[in-house]
Amino acid sequence: MFRLDERVAIVTGSGSAKGIGRTIALTLAEQGAKIVVADLNKEGIEETVSAITEAGGTALGVEVNVTDKASIDEMVAKTLETFGRIDILVNNAGISQKVTVDDMTLTDITKIFNVNMFGLFLCTQAVLGPMRKQKFGRIVSLSSVSAKRGGGVFGGAHYSASKAAVLGFSKNLAREVGLDGITVNCVAPGLVNTDIWKSLPQEDALQVISGIPLGRPGETKEIASTVAFLASEEASYITGEEIDINGGSHM
Ligand code: NAD
């Protein structure tokens, strides 16, 4: 695949057992990057770190709340103290909620935006300094197909809106930091074979599958390989881009 030797990558939300973030962390580690496994979930962090080290990789676990600036500053400080640089930030931490606009409260919206957009903003802002100094950086953020065509059976309008905000934010930032050697891109997964998928009632699952030309949900490794590409040297002339990974459910 795409080698990332000597690169240091922070992957937020990489503590979830069956989540996309853990597979991204493992994949980047396989490609030679040193990984900062950053999550709220202490146990999950330990499991991801163990999986990486057992496979011969290097990882540091850091408990972080991406909605809390002090906690993020601590994550960045620990990363620099341990590895001396930050080359890659994968903004993967995210939450969803299935609720209609009629039933949605301002608290619901704030909760979703706090993690999916404001948290992503705070993490991104915190790594720009070190990346500028190095004249190198790769920022890859998780948007969603929901940003482009609504969430359907999965999330509410607040989730879709937060993931659309990620796209606009990333494109703007890509223009600001290009001359600093930093690229900013997004991946927009469709339905992925994680706990969300497994929890769907069969009727909903069949309905979703019928709208996917490839006839199945994506696998976390299919998201992770695209992230590894965008983080690599091979993607050096790609910025402000979003890559759809959705089996054709949105073209
Ligand atoms: P997941 O729930 O399995 O993992 C998310 C992780 O983020 C968890 O480990 C959680 O502890 C962490 N997290 C949540 N809030 C946090 C906070 N405040 N600070 C730090 N960590 C926090 O989710 P997933 O399904 O693997 O999704 C990962 C990303 O991909 C999300 O951004 C999601 O919106 C996006 N996505 C997922 C799908 C899908 O089908 N699963 C589809 C499109 C986009």
Image (tube, grey):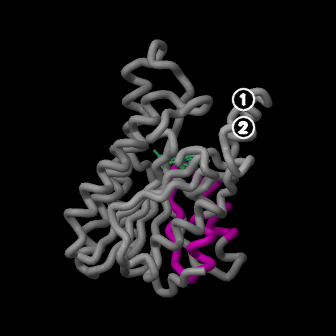
Q: Is mark 2 on a helix, strand or loop?
A: helix
The 10 Å Cα crowd at callout 1, few under 14, some 14 to 19, many 20 or more, is some
**Secondary structure that dominates the magenta span:** helix
Q: In this view, does 16 lie to the left or right of 128?
A: right
| CB-based contact (under 8 Å), mark 2 and mark 1 | no
Q: From the viewer's perspective, is residue 76 above or below residue 16?
A: below
Q: From the viewer's perspective, is residue 141 above or below residue 32?
A: above
Residue at image point 67% right, 44% down:
212
The 10 Å Cα crowd at callout 2, few under 14, some 14 to 19, many 20 or more, is few
Name the foreground residue: 98 vs 211. 211
Residue 204 bears which disc, if any? 1
Query: Looking at the picture, how far across and down is residue 170, in whole percent?
Result: 32, 55
Q: Write down the quadrant of residue 77 in the picture.
A: bottom left
- Mark 1 is on which residue type? Asp
Q: In this view, does 229 lie to the left or right of 205?
A: left
Q: What element carries label 1?
A: helix
Q: What residue range appears in magenta?
A: 24-51
User: Is 25 contained in the magenta span?
Assistant: yes
Work out how far the residue at label 2 is from the one at label 1, CA to CA, in angstroms: 10 Å
Query: Looking at the picture, how far across and down is residue 220, in whole percent?
Result: 65, 58
- Camera sees residue 80: no
- Mark 2 is on which residue type? Ser
Query: Looking at the picture, how far across and down is residue 57, in whole percent?
Result: 62, 80
- Camera sees residue 209: yes
Q: Write down the quadrant of residue 128 in the picture.
A: bottom left
Residue annotated with mark 2 = 210
Badge 2 or badge 1: first in the primary sequence: 1
Q: Residue furthest right?
A: 202
User: Is 130 contained in the magenta span?
Assistant: no
